[in-house]
Every structure is written in structure tokens, then in C-alpha cells.
Amino acid sequence: MDARTLKQLIEQGLPGADVEVQGADGVHFEARVTSAAFAGQPTLARHRMVYATLGDRMGGEIHALALKTVTPEEAGNGGG
């Protein structure tokens, strides 16, 4: 697993999302995901939406994923 592949998986699962992923060791990653789909959703629900795009890879190929999830409005206001 690499950051580019992880970014693509999240983008496929959350169409229209803006995704930034960092992680050089291949198992520990940090991602910032901006999506209108997060509007009105609490943080836990937002994280579950991202995890759902990764399926069984979480806990397997991806050992750890630190997430920051924001709506476009929150991103524009420095939120998240």
C-alpha cells in the first residue's frame, strides 16, 4: 500500500472528495478528506464513511490511518 493508492481508494468511495494522504512507511498514514457528503455528520460517522471505502484493508494492509474530515465549508473557514 502507498499513499497514492490509498488516495485513489478514498476518492473512488467518496466521489468528489478532495483527498490528501501522507505516509512513507506503507502501513501508517495520515489523510485529510474534504467532502460535501460530510455535511451534518458527526466526526465518528465521517470517519466510518472513509473506513468503508477501504474495507478489509484497514487493520490489514493499512495498520493505522489518522483522519481529518471536513466539509468544503469547514475547509474554507480553516475548520477541521
Image (spheres, rainbow, N blue to C red):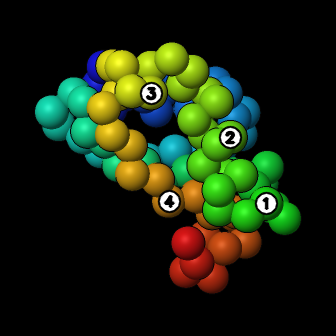
Asked whether disc 1 touches disc 4, contact meaning CB atoms under 8 Å apart, the reply is no
Q: Residue furthest left?
A: 25
Q: CA distance from mark 1 to mark 4?
A: 13 Å
For disc 3, the neighbor class at 10 Å (few under 14, some 14 to 19, many from 20) is: some
Q: Which residue is mark 2?
A: 49
| SS for callout 1 | loop
State the residue position of label 1: 41
Q: CA distance from mark 1 to mark 2?
A: 10 Å
How far apart are labels 2 and 4 at the CA level?
A: 12 Å
Asked whether disc 1 touches disc 2, contact meaning CB atoms under 8 Å apart, the reply is yes
> As shown in the figure, which amino acid type bears the numbered disc 2?
Met
Task: Using the numbered discs, state the Cα–Cα distance from disc 3 to disc 4 in whole angstroms.
Answer: 16 Å
Q: Position of residue 76 (x, y in %)?
A: 63, 75
* Quarter of the image with the N terminus in it: top left
Q: Which label's residue is closer to the chain start, 1 or 4? A: 1
Which residue position holds label 3?
58
Query: What amino acid type is highlighted by mark number 4?
Result: Lys
How far is mark 3 from mark 2, CA to CA? 13 Å
Q: Which residue in the protein does label 4 denote?
A: 68
Mark nearer the viewer, 3 or 4: 3
Q: Is residue 35 left or right of residue 4?
A: right
- Near mark 4 (Cα within 10 A), the count class, few <14, some 14-19 or many ≥20, is some
Q: Is residue 47 above or below residue 68?
A: above
